[in-house]
Amino acid sequence: MPIMRFDHLTILTRNIEASWEFYHQLPNSEAKPLSAEEGYFEVSFDDSVIGVFDSSVFASATNTSPATPGGAVIQFSVEDVDEYWSQLPDSYRETSASPKKMPWGSYSAYISDPDGNILEFYTW
């Protein structure tokens, strides 16, 4: 049976509360409320969804040993990188890579979430 479609991405976190604070403040996002007992929340960007799961809750529920949190690069296509960058909270911009032309042709800005996952906002 074929895969119907890619549905969403779930990343794992060591600190669900810090991740909630980070992701729900991203401009043009909609975050479903954090369920502390479930150790999970979702954040939507139009029709794209990122699930964020507490790594220990996930491991216990699935009887798996997932990879260490903090190894993903999550990329978002935006209309205007500079405008999106200006809408980010100041604390996100202070320790991040401001918008610039990349060697591979995109115009990109980068920030990191509390677990070290990298978020890229780009245009071509």
Image: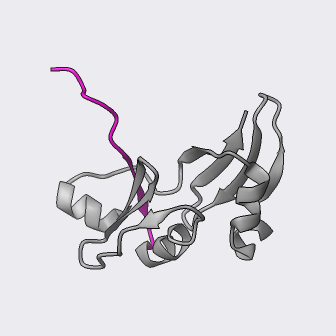
Residue at the (42%, 67%) spot, across then down? 31
Residue 44: quadrant of the picture: bottom left
Taking the spot 60% from the left edge, 64% from the top edge, the residue there is: 27
Residue 105: which quarter of the image?
A: top right
Report if residue 50 is visible in the image.
Answer: yes
Q: Up-down: is 46 above or below 15?
A: above
Q: Magenta segment: does it hold 102?
A: no
Q: Residue at x 35, y 75 (%)?
A: 34
Classify the position of the C terminus by image quarter: top right
How many circles with numbers are drawn on the protein? 0
Rendered location of residue 116, percent (x, y): 59, 59
Indicate whether residue 10 is drawn in magenta: yes
- Toward the top, the furthest residue is 1
Q: Indicate the colouring scheme.
A: one colour
Q: Is residue 95 visible?
A: no
Magenta stretch: dominant secondary structure? loop
The relative height of residue 64 versus residue 6 in the rendered view (above or below) is below
In magenta, the rendered stretch is 1-15
Decide if residue 55 is on the left or right side of residue 103: left
Which quadrant, please, contains the N terminus?
top left
Q: Position of residue 123 (x, y in %)?
A: 71, 39
Residue 86, position as x, y percentages in the image = 77, 64
Relative to 45, 39 lies left or right: left
